Image (cartoon, rainbow, N blue to C red):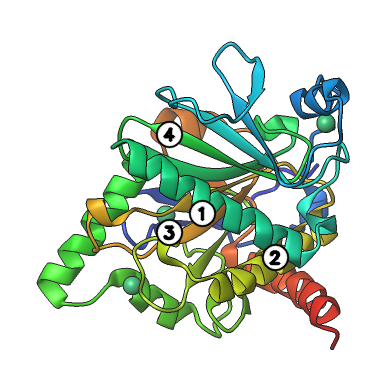
Amino acid sequence: MRNAFGVPELRRDYFTDRLTLTNTDRSVRGTDLAVEEEPDTECFVCDYVNSSKSKPSLPLIIEHTNSLSVNEVSDKSPQNNTHHVLVANLGHNSSFQKLPVDSISKLLSVAQENMKSQYGRKDNFVLLLARYGNAAGGILHPSLEMLTLPEIPSVIMEEMAAVERSMQDLGICPMCRVISVEQGGPRQLISTEHFIAFAPWAPTSSYEFWIYPKSHDSGFLSTSSRVINDLALILRSTLGGMQRELDKVPFSMSFHSINEKMGNDYHWHIEVHPMLKTWGSIEKGLGVFVNDISPEMTGEILGRAARKELAELVGI
Ligand SMILES: [Zn+2]
Ligand SMILES: [Zn+2]
Ligand SMILES: [Zn+2]
């Protein structure tokens, strides 16, 4: 692993006061960064499948309770702070890279329906996320997780406040503005009919990238099935490209999305954080994030890999 740091550049996030130090040394590549070996730990999905009498249908929905016991979801009234895991593939240690686009599409549609019913029953915030790999605190199956939280997470609150300020002061959504700046630029990975994937100007992780719908929409819940198919395509292309370049890197992916009860001044999106290293003293002590790879390099490296995946998927 190489620790050499070129000329660090201090950058501020588009919307919040978050600062990052970005390495501008273009000679550092992903292969220079260490990826933790995945220790083989117990897997509650495999335990569940092995203990079932019949083979479960996919996606398999598991309610993961605080006591870590698992139950298939029933009609009984949901508890507070429920955690649902939607598993797309029963093969242990399989990943999004191998998942067919229509399986991702189905997973997203089931997650959307499930989120709608969660929001219909209580006032909590429903966080949709995916975590792959033990280092990400996740599971070794391609899956989406749904967590009900008592309030909106602070990172989303800060973004909502930035959108509201810009709408009031300038009459424009700052996220729509960022999309038009990043479209076709050096940080773009790929663009499909409805979505754009790009590395943010001031990322908090090396190889971080975001996926935004090109048209202004506050939440994933209103996304039509046709647009979900396109979302599955860009997710599969970018995550597959990431694994093509970084092998089975642990990652987390969160949907920053609100529902209509929380207002309309927001532009929903997905943030993907590969986990190549743990945070060091600068991150912990100062809250300033250090990146070994500039987002311009991420755009170049992951963009090329994602374009190859996309070309194979659509048969070009
Ligand atoms: Zn497993
Ligand atoms: Zn917008
Ligand atoms: Zn966000």
Give the CA distance from mark 2 to mark 3. 22 Å
* Callout 4: SS: strand
The residue lying at 86 percent from left, 31 percent from top is 54
Residue farthest to the left?
169
Asked if 110 appears above or below 52 in the picture, the reply is: below
Residue assigned mark 2: 238
Q: Position of residue 296 (x, y in %)?
A: 60, 70
In the image: residue 88, left or right of residue 72: right
Q: Considering depth in this image, is 3 or 175 the residue closer to the camera?
A: 175
Residue assigned mark 1: 112
Asked if 171 appears above or below 1 in the picture, the reply is: below
The residue lying at 68 percent from left, 33 percent from top is 138
Task: Say whether mark 2 is within 8 Å of ligand 3.
Answer: no
The residue lying at 58 percent from left, 11 percent from top is 67
Inspect the image, locate mark 3, and give the three-letter code of the amino acid beneath it: Leu
Inspect the image, locate mark 2, and give the three-letter code of the amino acid beneath it: Thr
Residue assigned mark 3: 221
Which of the image's four quarters has the C terminus? Answer: bottom right
Give the CA distance from mark 1 to mark 4. 14 Å
The residue lying at 34 percent from left, 77 percent from top is 177
Which of the image's four quarters has the N terminus? Answer: top right
- Mark 3 or 1 closer to N-term? 1
Q: Which mark is residue 148?
A: 4
